[in-house]
Amino acid sequence: MSVLQLNKLVKRYDSVEVLHGIDLKVHKGEFLVLIGPSGCGKSTLLRMLAGLEDITSGSLTLDGKEINDVPSQKRDFSMVFQSYALYPHLTVYENIAFGLKVRKADQAHIDKMIDWAADILNLAPLLQRTPKQLSGGQCQRVAMGRALVREPKLFLFDEPLSNLDAKLRIQMRAEMKALHLKLQTTTVYVTHDQVEAMTLADRIVVMNVGVIEQIGTPLELYDNPVNLFVAGFLGAPAIAFIRGTVQNREGQLGVAVQDTQQGTENTFIPVQHVDVAVGQEIVLGIRPEFFQLQTAGQQSCILKVKVKFIEAMGAESYVHGQVCGQDLIAKTALRLDYQPGQIIDVGVDLTALHVFDANSGLRLSN
Ligand code: ADP
Ligand code: MG
C-alpha cells in the first residue's frame, strides 16, 4: 500500500525547471532512498514532500488525499537535515521536547517520549547539555530524537550523516537501519552516498538532472541497471565501461575494442544473448568482481590488461588497469605483486557482461 504518491511533480524556480515531472509511490513502512549527484534535485523534492517548497504543478497525495497546499506543520512528517538545526541555547532535553511543547502535549507524555527516545539513541547522559557541548554524532542523535518523539507518519532525512567522520557515519548508518527495523516508520532518505543507499534502502530511486532514472531494490539496480548512468552510479569500486564496435568474427558476434595506446593487439570480447547489429557502437559494463585474475573460468575471454597500480585493502585488492587504453578496476581476494606498467592476462566472465547502446546509453542485455 502506498502512503505517499507523487504524480508528475514539477518544480520551477522562475524560468528554470529543476524537477521535470516526478512519479513515485512511497509504500507504507518502507525505507526509500533518493540518490543522485549533487544538484539533481533531491533536496528540492524532499522539501516539497515536507511542505517547505511550493509544488509548481502535479499532485502530492497522502493516504489518497491531495496535500499540495497543506502547510508543513499540519503534514505530520518529521524532517532531519544535514545541518541538524538544533536550538543552540536550549538543552538536549528542551531541543527534543520542543516540537511536543509547541503542540501542547502534556508534561507526562513529553517525559515518557523523551525517556523512550533517549533510551533508543543513548542520549540519557546528555539531556542537560547544550549543543555546543556535543560532538557531531551526538548532535545528529539529538536531531533524530527530536524527529522520533513526534511519532510522525513519515520521516524525511536529507543527508543526515554527511557531516560525520567516516567511522561515525558507518556506525550511525547501522543504527539508522536498526531503528527502522524497530519502528517501521515510512522513511524517505536523501543521500549522494551509494553505500548508504545500498545498505539502508528497501528501494532506491536514482535521480539525475531532475528526472528519475530507475527505481528498484538495491540488488535489482546493481544487477540490472537500465542505463549507463545507473550502472556507473551504483557500485564501489565502479563498474568498468569498455567501448567498441560490434563485429562478426567467424559467426560470433562481439565487441572489437581498438587499442589506442599500449601497442598490444586489438581486443575482441564475444557477446551472447543480446540483440546487437554489426557496426553498432556499444559499451560493455563489467563489475570489478567479474574480472578473473590468475584463474579464468569456463565462459571467459582473456584481456591483456596494463596495470596502473594496486590498492591493497587487506581482505581484498583493487587492480587499476587499462585494456586498450580504457580504464578498469578488478577486485580480488588474492594478494598480488604486479608492477605498474606490467601487462597481465585478466579473464572476464562473459555471463556477467552488461551491454549498453553507446548512443542512447540504454541497456541491451537482460
Ligand atoms: P541536490 O539536493 O540533489 O543536490 P537541490 O535540490 O538542492 O539538489 O537543487 C536542484 C537544483 O535546483 C540545483 O540546480 C539548484 O541550483 C536549484 N535550486 C535549488 N534551490 C533553489 C532556489 N531556491 N532558487 C533557485 N534555484 C534553486
Ligand atoms: Mg541536497
Image (tube, rainbow, N blue to C red):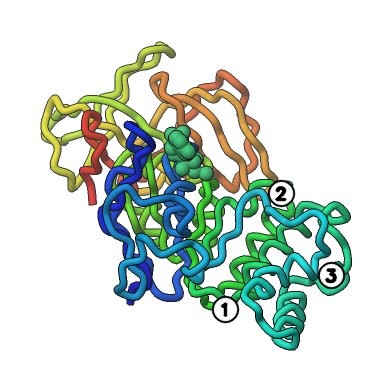
Label 3 amino acid?
Leu
Element type at marker 2?
loop
Q: Is mark 2 within 8 Å of ligand 2?
A: no
Label 2 amino acid?
Leu
User: How many marks overall?
Assistant: 3
Q: Earlier in the sequence, mark 1 or mark 3?
A: 3
Q: Is mark 3 within 8 Å of ligand 2?
A: no
The residue located at (25%, 43%) in the rendering is 363
Residue 108: percent from left, percent from top:
74, 88
Label 1 belongs to which residue? 183
Number of residues whose C-alpha sits closer than 10 Å to that of mark 3, classed few (under 14), some (14–19) or many (20 or more): some
Label 3 belongs to which residue? 127
The residue located at (39%, 20%) in the rendering is 324
Residue 268: percent from left, percent from top:
27, 28
Element type at marker 3?
loop
Label ID, residue 164? 2
Task: Give the alpha-carbon distance from disc 1 to disc 3, as whole Å.
Answer: 22 Å
